[in-house]
Image: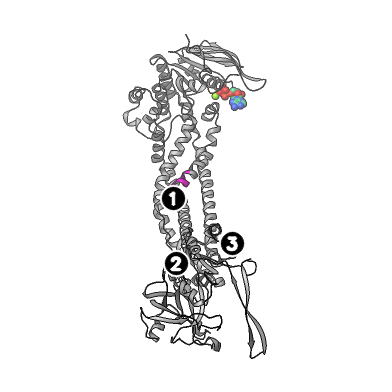
Amino acid sequence: MSIFKRAFLYVTRKRGKTILLFTILLIMATFVLTGLSIWKASETVQFDLRQSLGGKFDVFVDWNNSPYVVKETVKEEYDEDTKKTSNGFIMYSTVQFTPENIAAIKDVSGVKYCSARQDNLLPFEGLSLFPGTISTDAKYQGYTKALGVCNTEDDELFITGTLTLTEGRHVSADDTHVAIISQDLAERNELKIGDYLTAHCYSIEDQGFTGQKIKVQIIGLFTPNAVEQFGETVTTYDKIQNRVFVDLQSSKEFDGGEINYGFSALHVTIADPQDMARVLAEVKALPGIDWKAFTVEVDNETYENAAAPLAALNELVVTLLVVIIGVSAIILALILTLWTKTRIHEIGVFLSVGIRKPAIIGQYLIEVLLIAVLAFGLSYFTSNAIAGQIGNQLLEQSMQTESEDDNNLVTAAAAVDVDADNLIQKPLPTEDGIQVSVGLDNLAQFYLIGLAIITVAVSASSITVMRLNPREILSKMS
Amino acid sequence: MPTLEVKNVSYAYERGKAVLQNVCAELATGKLYAILGLSGSGKTTLLSLLGGLDVPTQGSVLFDGEDISAKGLEHHRRNHISLIFQSYNLIDYMTPIENVRLTAKLDAAPILERLGLTKDETHRNVLELSGGQQQRVAIARALASDAPVILADEPTGNLDTDTADEITAILKESAHAFGKCVIVVTHDREVAKQADVVLEIKRGHLKEKEM
Ligand SMILES: Nc1ncnc2c1ncn2[C@@H]1O[C@H](COP(=O)(O)OP(=O)(O)O)[C@@H](O)[C@H]1O
Ligand SMILES: [Mg+2]
């Protein structure tokens, strides 16, 4: 008689034991599988959260230590109010980021966006601006901010969703003498795509924008998704509707000098904040960037704040899972040991008819596996039912309690970029509900785990059989 | 040539306390042997040495002229020996015929029938069989396994006199009709009366006894 036939006979004839073992295995499997699926779901949520938060770091000129920083006295200035003469000076770095550097950084895997701006505060001819809530220095009346970028699509304000391009197209690296303004500003000034804005470049002699005339063509219009709240203080030139985006070439021309040929600061957004160290290392290894000139500042706090409660939950689930697996193995081993002790006569008969010990233990293993295959299969449904309930609650709770505790998570996670510029609230991906369900991949994994538990338990319970000396058969049987 | 030969076998569980001393015996096929002795005299010990369940402290056991430890005791147990105990001989989750088929090399059904079990009984739950029927199944399994030696340790110990006589008769038939070497350990003199050869263990020594 084959080992399988023996195992099959045992399982089918000893129904009470089979049902008991089936129930035990079903409960264990449900626990483990539920834990496994919650763990998986929490990993997924963490991953999604990381993706939605992204990570950020800034690279900028190291004004204190860079050997390339130049400080030039410009002109003596006489201040009417203080009756003092002061030396005006400008400070700049002779090493700056070029559009090529930006392109290289963008190519590093894991980097989503690399944005850089030159900004100039300047007046555009005949452009009527929205007034700010606080008055500006008389000198800057009628001035607004012109941001010179390689491409607007990668700009902070657009990637965070604060601004959306509603008409026309983005400024790209190849463009010269183009601009994007707000829809509101366009309406106020009766401007449309294709129209021109005019400004003059900076003249060092005159100390003002009185130089050569520069015309930029409007190629796109944006709409802000949020404006500053009521009562918030903002100057005219900082008002989001007054913002003008131009290409780098135009920006350099506005600037007038030869000094600012590139960017002195970069803002890099990466897909997964967990990748921060690697991405940084790769960026630092890029050729063509002189790191003596720059310094890096990492902002991973948002991620760390938001990910902490989930990481804690994850740890808890993993710990629970390990405990459940361990306890399951122990309980199973104890039960099987007890049962093996009651099967001592059977072992005696088997040994006496020449069935070897490994074949006896093998039969026990097959018996448990036969029952386990069915119990595990059913546990797919029971754990799915439970995981859907408990899992969602657990995950949602862990996110809620955390946000109630320090009110940090939601704000931290939502206001992806906490900036004067950035007022948009991005919802967490998890708010749409966390999907906790048991997948077939979980089941497959669990079969492996279950097999290990059962093998350990059966081996442990079989010590009695292994120890049995053939001579003892006779004394045990009499 | 005798099937089993015991050559100057001594055995002690503890040093200096010999259970068997210099035991010699020749056991041939086709004969029913009875080993008599008081409780604790060493009958089961001798049986375990014959069955290759243990090794003698001194001396040797030969099967067909070869030391049973030469090819390994397991080989001896699997191929030459069938054991029958006083009770619990059957696997309770197998029917009688399945119990016989556990190690059967021969067709189980005719052997069971010959030992007096009806077809219905061979498919019953073994726990519903009487003690005598259970021993018949155990003997049938020994016969079906085709091992040349049957070692039985007090096979009638749990049975009433009439049933014991029937089982003894079957064991005798196994030796005479099936050509087995049947060795029965017993303290029952009635069983011994049926045997072809009666051996007795007294103070560690084995002696042939005239009945
Ligand atoms: N495993 C053992 N360890 C020590 N002594 C044993 C063991 N088994 C049996 N004995 C002793 O050996 C002697 C013979 O035992 P046994 O062969 O079982 O006798 P019988 O079967 O004739 O009643 C007895 O005195 C018994 O106490
Ligand atoms: Mg005994």
Occupied quadrant, residue B119: top left
User: SS of the residue at dot 1?
Assistant: helix
The furthest residue to the left: B119
- Quick check: marks 1 and 3 in contact, CB under 8 Å? no
Are there few (<14), some (14-19), or many (20+) residues within 10 Å of tag 2?
Answer: some
Residue at the extreme top:
B1
> Residue A281: x percent and y percent?
56, 57
Disc 3 target residue: A291
> Are the residues flagged by discs 2 and 1 in contact, CB closer than 8 Å?
no
Amino acid type, residue under disc 3 in the picture: Trp
Chain letter behind tag 2: A
Alpha-carbon distance for marks 3 and 2?
Answer: 37 Å
Q: Nearer the viewer, mark 3 or mark 2?
A: 3
Give the quarter of the figure containing the N terminus of chain A. Answer: top left
Mark 1: C-beta under 8 Å from nearest atom of ligand 1: no
Q: Is A83 or A227 nearer to us in this picture? A: A83
Q: Nearer the viewer, residue A277 or B68?
A: A277
Residue A409 disc label: none
- From the image, tell me which residue sits under label 1: A26
Q: Which residue is mark 2?
A: A429
Mark-to-mark CA distance, 1 and 3 = 60 Å
Q: Which residue is rendered at x = 39% and y = 78% of the image?
A: A218
Magenta-drawn stretch contains A296: no
Ligand 2 shows up in which quadrant of the image?
A: top right
The residue range painted magenta reads A444-451
The image quadrant of residue A173 is bottom left
Q: Is residue A221 visible?
A: no
Task: Check the image and report above or below for B139 versus A427.
Answer: above
Residue A327 is situated, as x and y percent measured from the top left of the image, at: 53, 49
